[in-house]
Amino acid sequence: MRQDTRMKSDLGGSQTVVEPISSPLGALGDGISLQAVGHSYGDLRTIDSLDLQVEAHSVIGLVGPSGCGKSTLLELICGLREPTQGTIEVAGRAAAEDRLARCAFMPQRDLLLPWYSAIDNAALALRNQGMRRRPARAAAAALFDRFGLAGFEGARPAELSGGMRQRVAFLRTLIAGKPVLALDEPFAALDAITRAEMQEWLAAALRTDPRTVVLVTHDVEEALYLCDRVAVLSARPARTVAELSPPAPRAEDRDAAVTDPAFVAAREAALRALREGSR
């Protein structure tokens, strides 16, 4: 894995070196396994006998119609809910508390605390692990430059752009040191230009600091650009209707990647699978 990957910054287009953030759990996990997983809310069936294997350090995207159970599936993987049937293992552990200990969950909204500064929001994951305020802030501050946030440590969330808020939220997720990242539509609230910039930024960050990642998104292009594999889910109750791999090697430049003819063909195949799964 390259260690000199660079990412674009919101701050005047400057370049920032991304360096790995180590995991306190040692090796970054043994991947994720879902076997015949089903889930229901009472009589409402949300997920139907779903099988899924995610290799360690790989990035898988989940796409599907609205309301098909994608976010529920993330919560099941993270141990925030238990399946009605089947088994889920994260790094070989099936108990909910063990899955939760190995997963960092980033929801659709950044959920930054408006009364906290950027540095205190970023350090919150460490504070929740029992670290005292001063060392937690110091650990987060050491990462602000490489995340393109230097100079904004004391800024409140309302003073940050949408892209910068997402970087703080992602830093908070990554600094927890968990081997698995569960990302639920992390860029859905951003405008198209900022979203494209954040996709390129996240791809660079994951090349440098590999984790096992499950990404939920409605954006097929985003999934194919960021992920090693894309699972297309059906309408509720969710089941896998197709699994697609983006063309390789993918250009690090997003514009070059998404306009490549092989990428365009993969996007059309994904959209066809989505349409068929929505019927």
Image: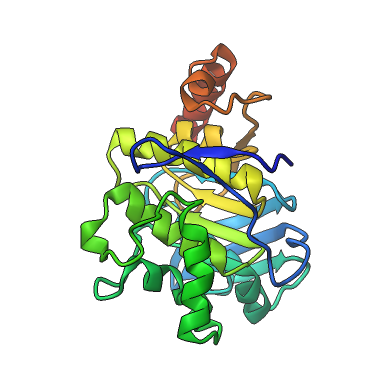
Residue drawn at x 31%, y 70% as measured from the top left: 117
In this orientation, which residue lies closer to the viewer: 171 or 274? 171
Residue 137 x/y as whole percent: 46, 75
View extreme (top): residue: 261
For residue 154, side relative to residue 42 (left or right) = left
Residue 232 shows up from this direction:
no
Instruction: Pick the residue in front: 202 or 227.
Output: 202
Up/down of 250 relative to 169, above or below = above
Q: Quadrant of the N terminus?
A: top right
Q: Which residue is painted at 62% across and 51% down in the image?
A: 19
In the rendered image, which quarter is residue 33 located in?
bottom right
Instruction: Please provide percent x and percent y for residue 181.
Output: 58, 59
Observer able to see residue 156: yes
Looking at the image, residue 115 sits to the left or right of residue 205; the answer is left
Q: Nearer the viewer, residue 32 or 73?
A: 32
> Which corner quadrant holds the C terminus?
top left
